[in-house]
Amino acid sequence: MRILRLIQYIRSKISRKGSVVIFVVAAMGMASFTIAIKFFSDAQDEFAAARIGTEGLQARQLALAGFQAGLGALKNTPEEYLFKLGFAFDPPDLQVSDKCNRCFVKYRIQPEDGRLNVNFLVRQSDDMPDGTYRSIFQRFFANYNIPLDAVDSLIDWIDENENREGQGGEASYYDNLKPPITIKNGPIFSVSEMALVKDLSRQLLFESKEPPNWQKEQSSLRFQTEDEVSLLTMDDWIPANNLTAYLSSEGETGKVNVNAARYHVLMSLSDSMTKQAVLEIFKLRRENGGYIKELSDLQSLPSLQRTTSSGVTLYAELAGEGGDFTGLLKTKGEVYRITGVGTIVPREDGQNNPVIRKISGLYDRKQRRLIYYSEE
C-alpha cells in the first residue's frame, strides 16, 4: 500500500509541475551543449596549435636543409659558373619525397656586395665619414627623391661620436622623440633598421619609386633591345633592393661587384656615369654569359672613355687606375646571402594556411665563414 501511495504522489507532482521539470531539463541540456561546444572549440584550438608546432618543426628542418644546400653550392661551385648557370642562384622548389607530398624545400643565393653597404659611410679605422661613400649615397638617394640630409643622419646613427654631421641627428634628437629611441652608435645589421633613422622611413626605403606611367611607357617601347629591356625592372625602383647592411671583414674595400650591381647602384658610383655606360656594362655582362672575369674587359667600352672631373677616364676612375683613387668596382664577389625556405602546404580541406619557415645567412667566401644567421 505504501508503494502505491508513493507512485500516486509522484504522479500528482508531475501533473502540477510538469512544465517546470521540462524547463529545468531543457536548461540543463542547453548548458551541457554549450559546455560541449566550448570543450570542442578549445580542443580544436589545441589540436591546431599542436599541428602548427609539429609542422613548424618539420618546415624548419626543410628550411635548414635548403640553407645547407645553398651553402654547399656556394662553397663548392666556382663563382663564374654560379653566374653563368643562373638557376644555381635560384633553383625551383623541390618536393621532398612521395611520403610527404605536401613538403617542399627551396634555397636562393644572392650576391650581397652588388649592393651599397650603408656601413661603409663610416670608416672603421678612425670613426670618420667616408667622403667617397657619402657622395655615392647622395647620388643614390637623389635618384629616388630621398632627402639628401638622410646621408648625414645615417652617418650620425653609425659613428660612435656625438658630433652632428650637417643636418643629421645625434642622441639628443632621438631622446626627444615620442616615444624616444636609443641611437645605435654602431654598425647597422639590416636595411629595416635604416627606417629608424632621421629623415628615413619604411615607406621611403621599401615602396616603389617608379615614375608615373613608367610601366605603360616601357610596354610601348617594342623596339628596345634585350639589354635595354633588362636595364630597369620593377624591382630596381625599390631602394631597399639596392642596399645592404652587414659588418664587413677587416680590410674590405667597399668595392661593388660589377657582376651583381643593379642600374641605380652603378649610376651612383660616379657623377660621370651615364645610362649609356650602364647599358654597355650590362651588354658586356650578357655577352660573357653573365660574368665579367676581369675589370680590364671594361676598358674597351666607348662610354667609359669619357674624361671625368678628376681628369681621368671613367674606366680609370671605376677600376682604380686614376692616380691614388682606389676604384669602386670588382669582379669577384665576397659576401653572399643564402636563404633556405621550408614549406608544408595545407591539406585538401583547405582550412589551414601553409606552414613556412625561413633561414637566412651571410657567407663570406673569402674568409670562408658565416657572418650573419637568422631564423624566421
Image (spheres, helix red, strand yellow):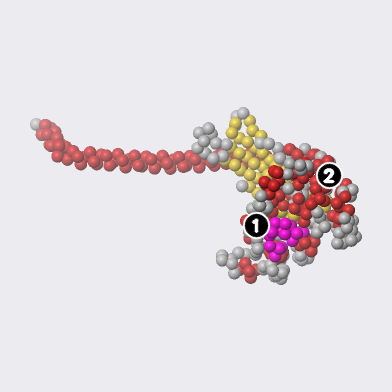
Which sits earlier in the primary sequence, circle 1 or circle 2? 1
Of 244 and 62, the residue lying toward us: 244
What is the CA distance from the residue labelled 1 to the residue labelled 2?
Answer: 32 Å
* Percent coordinates x, y for residue 305 in the rendering: 88, 53
In this view, the residue in front, 278 or 181, is: 278
Q: How many labels does the image show?
A: 2
Which numbered dot is residue 284? 2
Q: Assign a secondary structure to mark 2.
A: helix
Residue drawn at (44%, 40%) of the image: 43
Amino acid type of the residue that numbered disc 2 sits on in the rendered structure: Leu
Residue at image position (54%, 42%) is 53
Horizontal side, residue 81 vs residue 25: left or right: right
Coordinates of residue 237 in the picture (x, y in percent): 69, 51
Q: Mark 1 points at which residue?
A: 204
Part of the protein shown in magenta: 136-151
Element carrying mark 1: helix
